[in-house]
Image (cartoon, grey):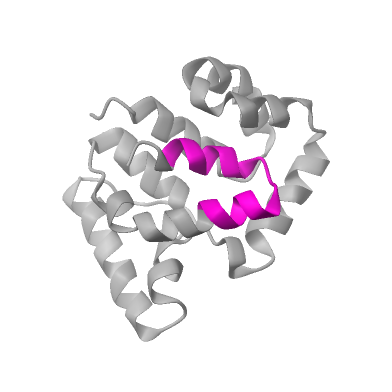
Amino acid sequence: MPSDAVLYQAAALCLTYPDDDFRARLPLLREAAPQLREFVDHAAVTPAQELAAHYVRVFDVTDRHSLHLSRWQDGDTRRRGMSLVRFQEVYRAAGLELTGEELPDFLPAVLELAARTGDLGLLTGHRDGLEHLRSRLTDLGTPYATVLDAVCATL
């Protein structure tokens, strides 16, 4: 397991939709991952509806800030299908199965894979996309940029 496993798991949680479970975990996230304190402190003082609306505006309205890593490399092309298969193969090789609605290239899922297995291959293989996302989030001025700053600093 990488020395940054706790950071990757915490970042995965920070990059998921901020529901009630997310809010309940904020004190633990603050202590476990000091690199994310700026974001966690922001999330703690932001009203729940406002934080949720911000998440949707940033990540769900357009692909400009997509949390799906294959979009950064393949766009919306046929190649993306093959990329998604490769992501799924990495999960299976690690003995993990994705549950839920998200695609295997969803950044929080990839971060959780890295935290659980120590396999940074998907993250490092998509570092350019992560850097583009980080840059766009920084330009937008969203606190989510600090989460990507912390992750990118480890790769």
Relative to 24, residue 77 above or below: below
Looking at the image, residue 139 lies above or below residue 95 = below
* Residue at 59 percent of width and 60 percent of height: 65
Looking at the picture, tell me which residue is in the foreground, 11 or 143. 143
Foreground residue among 51 and 93: 51
User: Is 63 situated above or below 37?
Assistant: below
- In x, y percent, where is residue 115? 33, 34
The verdict on residue 135 being magenta is yes
Where does the image place residue 119, in percent across and percent down from the top left? 23, 42
Quadrant of image for the N terminus: top left
Which residue occupies 73% across, 57% down?
A: 57
Where does residue 68 sit, x and y in percent of width and height? 47, 61
Q: Is residue 60 magenta?
A: no
Residue 155 falls in image quadrant: top left
Would you identify the image quadrant in which residue 37 lies? top right
Horizontally, residue 140 falls left or right of residue 97, namely right
Q: Residue 47 in the image: state x and y as whole percent.
A: 82, 33
- Residue positioned 66% across, 40% down in the render: 143
| Residue at 69% across, 54% down | 140
Magenta stretch, residue numbers: 134-151
Would residue 97 appear left or right of 59 to someone viewing this image? Answer: left
Residue lying farthest to the left in this orientation? 93
Say whether residue 124 is left or right of residue 77: left
